[in-house]
């Protein structure tokens, strides 16, 4: 998976899965493994955090997923659409199966072409609809056709008012008070649709691992078709088809799209090879983007396997305590 962001620092909780990437900002390392802002590092942690030691750190949604860092910004502010374009093109050319773009920028014909090229190359492209405090309408690349546009739910599992409402929204995931990795060995809490997007990207990686025969379009279909409808019946502007349900996405019978390939949920996930993914995990939260940072003191709550409430079928995200060292 490519994380197109501010770079990804080799934090102890993600360094085992961090591959060689690129720094399109002209940074000294050149491989994307530096992050002065911290935003890209926290996104990578939500996707592929694997903890460290016997019971330390955090666990992300897909803790065996490869992370390819694509650094397109040093500050995380005033994101240049042409830099995002270059990042998407680089990720497409270098084997990404999922591209996480937890940021917003302005419209660009070149960016539209780059995103379209990634989708045509059978890549799942995931992006946030934006945060209501700073964005009045959904921004790009989430506004482009074919992008899986993600909104946020709060700690109550319902739509968060901090998430932009839009007809483009397709799915929601936790986005309030989310704890994740920060450079160098720290942890921080933030709120926003960026975090929701990383969680959905991790889920997309899990689906691609379990059902490798599915196209990117079918992966998106499986995620949205198994989402829990938490708003007005049917698709709505708050959470689209509903709240992400990782368990159902990996186990439910989902009719394929017309002309698509069916996938049997009874298939057992085999022992993963290097760079694959093996477990379904997540984190709970929602809201407006907080400044990166935070200390590693005390306890960090990482996400573990999503579970369905007996009898209710409601997906919730269980928080597991892992001691920070």
Image (cartoon, rainbow, N blue to C red):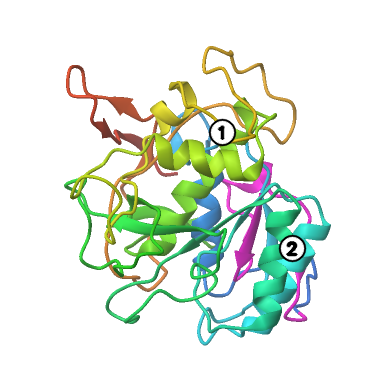
Main SS, magenta region, reads loop
- Mark 2 or 1: in front is 2
Q: Secondary structure at mark 2?
A: helix
Report if residue 25 lies within the magenta region: yes
Up the image or down, 187 lies above or below 282; here it is below
Q: Is residue 113 left or right of residue 12?
A: right
Residue 21 visible in the snapshot: no
The image quadrant of residue 246 is top left
Disc 1 target residue: 207
Q: Earlier in the sequence, mark 2 or mark 1?
A: 2
Q: Is residue 27 left or right of residue 190?
A: right
Q: Which circle marks residue 117 in the picture? A: 2
Up the image or down, 204 lies above or below 263; here it is below
Q: Residues within 10 Å of mark 1 (few under 14, many from 20)?
A: many
Q: Which circle marks residue 166 in the picture? A: none
Report if residue 107 lies within the magenta region: no
Q: Secondary structure at mark 1?
A: helix
Q: Residue at x 23, y 30 (%)?
A: 314
């Amino acid at each position: 998976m490519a994380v197109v962001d501010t770079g990804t620092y080799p934090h102890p909780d993600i360094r085992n899965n961090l591959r060689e990437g690129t720094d399109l900002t002209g940074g000294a390392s050149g491989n994307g493994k530096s992050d002065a802002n911290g935003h890209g590092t926290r996104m990578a942690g939500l996707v592929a955090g694997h903890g460290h030691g016997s019971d330390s750190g955090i666990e992300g949604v897909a803790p065996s997923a490869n992370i390819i860092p694509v650094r397109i910004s040093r500050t995380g502010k005033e994101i240049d659409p042409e830099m995002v374009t270059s990042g998407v093109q680089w990720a497409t050319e270098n084997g990404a199966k999922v591209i996480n773009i937890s940021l917003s920028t302005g419209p660009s014909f070149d960016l539209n072409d780059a995103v379209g090229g990634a989708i045509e190359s059978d890549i799942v492209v995931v992006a946030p609809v934006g945060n209501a405090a700073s964005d009045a309408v959904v921004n790009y690349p989430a506004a482009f056709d074919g992008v899986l546009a993600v909104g946020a739910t709060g700690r109550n599992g319902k739509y968060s008012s901090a998430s932009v409402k839009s007809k483009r929204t397709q799915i929601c995931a936790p986005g309030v008070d989310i704890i994740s990795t920060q450079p160098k060995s720290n942890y921080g809490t933030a709120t926003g649709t960026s975090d929701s997007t990383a969680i959905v990207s991790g889920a997309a990686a899990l689906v691609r691992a379990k059902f490798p025969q599915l196209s990117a379009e079918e992966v998106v279909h499986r995620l949205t078709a198994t989402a829990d409808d938490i708003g007005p019946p049917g698709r709505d502007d708050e959470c689209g088809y509903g709240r992400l349900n990782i368990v159902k996405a990996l186990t439910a019978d989902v009719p394929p799209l017309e002309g698509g390939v069916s996938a049997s949920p009874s298939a057992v996930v085999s022992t993963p090879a290097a760079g694959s993914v093996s477990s379904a995990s997540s984190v709970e939260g929602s809201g407006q983007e907080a400044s990166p940072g935070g200390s590693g003191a005390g306890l960090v709550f990482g996400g573990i396997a999503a579970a369905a409430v007996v009898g209710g079928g409601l997906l919730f995200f269980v928080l597991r305590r892992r001691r920070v060292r």
